Image: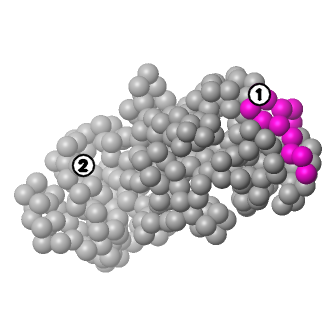
């Protein structure tokens, strides 16, 4: 059951059974959960620091519907899936790297046996259980630290056809896809109170924008005034569905039968963490469902770090997540040395 791969320069076997960990189990320096830009960037920097890293990934990226990613220096327009493929190959190019395709089902903290100078400062190890997918086996692995980079799960407004156009005609990241929608008649669909802010950002790319509140989102008087000053219309009637054909989105149909012609737009999903980290590890979760971390990416439990979309301020461009992964990896390496 426990991880039994060969030891690297920074880890060694456990000397006794503790918390269900077998005596022969190898201890990774870090288990990285999630192989998106944040996790891959962190993993790459950690193995370059000669840390033994196990990366667990369920192959369920939030951006799987997106055909092209923009704003990533030297990779503008690349498929997010291709970017993940390239990043994984770079990570696995180091002997300290191990990649396993599996869905994490639980993470637990166990006391660390006495390992001399190799003992973690907090005196605890982390045991991650994962269920294999696409032919890979189940896995139980142990590490001195955990880096959470699983991103977020997004929930779109409950419209029957919205998924058919998401990633092509409809997007969620204005910075990522706004340029490709320049000067087009666009919709901004959402049910959250931050629609006005998003609409004002979108006005950089088009002068023909309508905000659809689906009869749910509320706008303040100040929001209304700001939108009106930019010529942005607000449609408050409930939405029935997204209209379109093989060429893409053609409009937004309302429950009263009206169809508002739009060629594309943006949607504001709601977000939640990919796993129940509060239950698994006792991590602090903010009201916006993001993980509470400090400036170095440290979560509320010693030895647990987080990077990427699951941390404030939430969903970001891929290049921002990758940069955050590198920054948190540096802090994590210092933690393992005992400098943090």
Front residue of 114 and 287: 114
> Which residue is depicted at the point 77% across and 27% down?
9
- Which residue is rendered at x = 58% and y = 59% of the image? 301
On screen, residue 186 versus residue 109, left or right, reads left
- Tell which of 10 and 102 is nearer to you: 10
Which residue is denoted by mark 1 in the rendering?
9
User: Cβ–Cβ below 8 Å for labels 1 and 2?
Assistant: no
Q: Position of residue 170 (x, y in %)?
A: 40, 51
Say which element carries label 1: loop
Expressed as whole percent of the image width and height from the top left, the position of residue 28 reads: 75, 40
- Residue at (25% x, 74% y) in the render: 218
10 Å crowding of disc 1: few (<14), some (14-19), many (20+) = few
Is residue 317 placed above or below 8 in the rendered structure? below
> Residue 12 in magenta?
yes
Nearer-the-camera pick, 152 or 179: 152
* Mark 2 residue element: helix
Q: Residue 196: x, y in percent? A: 22, 61
Q: Is residue 26 visible?
A: yes
Taking the magenta stretch, the answer to whether it contains residue 140 is: no
Q: Is 20 located above or below residue 143 in the figure?
A: below
Residue extending farthest to the left is 229
**Nearer-N-terminus badge (1/2):** 1
Quarter of the image holding residue 191?
bottom left
Q: Which residues are magenta?
A: 5-16
Residue sitting at 66 percent across and 53 percent down?
122
Q: Which residue is mark 2?
A: 202
The label nearer to you, 1 versus 2, is 1
Q: Is residue 148 visible?
A: no
């Amino acid at each position: 059951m426990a991880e039994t791969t060969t030891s690297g320069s920074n880890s060694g076997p456990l000397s006794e059974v503790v918390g269900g960990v077998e005596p022969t189990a190898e201890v990774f320096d870090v288990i990285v959960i999630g192989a998106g830009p944040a996790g891959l960037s962190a993993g790459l920097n950690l193995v370059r620091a000669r840390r033994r890293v196990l990366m667990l990934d369920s192959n369920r990226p939030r951006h799987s519907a997106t055909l092209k990613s923009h704003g990533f220096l030297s990779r503008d327009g690349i498929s997010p899936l291709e970017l993940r493929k390239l990043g994984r190959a770079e990570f696995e190019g180091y002997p300290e790297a191990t990649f396993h395709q599996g869905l994490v089902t639980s993470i637990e903290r166990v006391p660390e046996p006495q390992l001399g100078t190799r003992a973690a400062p907090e005196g605890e190890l982390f045991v991650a259980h994962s269920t294999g997918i696409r032919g890979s086996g189940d896995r139980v692995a142990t590490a001195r630290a955990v880096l959470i980079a699983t991103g977020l799960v997004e929930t779109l407004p409950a419209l029957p056809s919205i998924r058919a156009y998401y990633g092509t005609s409809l997007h969620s990241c204005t910075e990522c896809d706004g340029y490709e929608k320049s000067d087009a008649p666009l919709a901004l669909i959402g049910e959250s109170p931050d629609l006005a802010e998003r609409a004002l950002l979108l006005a950089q790319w088009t002068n023909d924008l309508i905000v659809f509140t689906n009869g749910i989102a509320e706008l303040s008087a100040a929001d209304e005034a700001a939108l009106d000053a930019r010529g942005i219309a607000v449609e408050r009637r409930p939405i029935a569905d997204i209209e379109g054909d093989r060429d893409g989105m053609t409009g937004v149909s309302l429950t009263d039968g009206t169809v508002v012609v739009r060629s594309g737009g943006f949607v504001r999903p709601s977000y939640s963490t990919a796993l129940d980290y509060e239950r698994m590890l006792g991590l602090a979760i903010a009201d916006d469902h993001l993980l509470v971390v400090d400036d170095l990416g440290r979560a509320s439990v010693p030895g647990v770090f987080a990077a990427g979309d699951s941390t404030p301020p939430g969903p970001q461009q891929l290049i921002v997540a990758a940069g955050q992964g590198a920054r948190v990896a540096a802090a994590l390496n210092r933690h393992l040395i005992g400098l943090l």
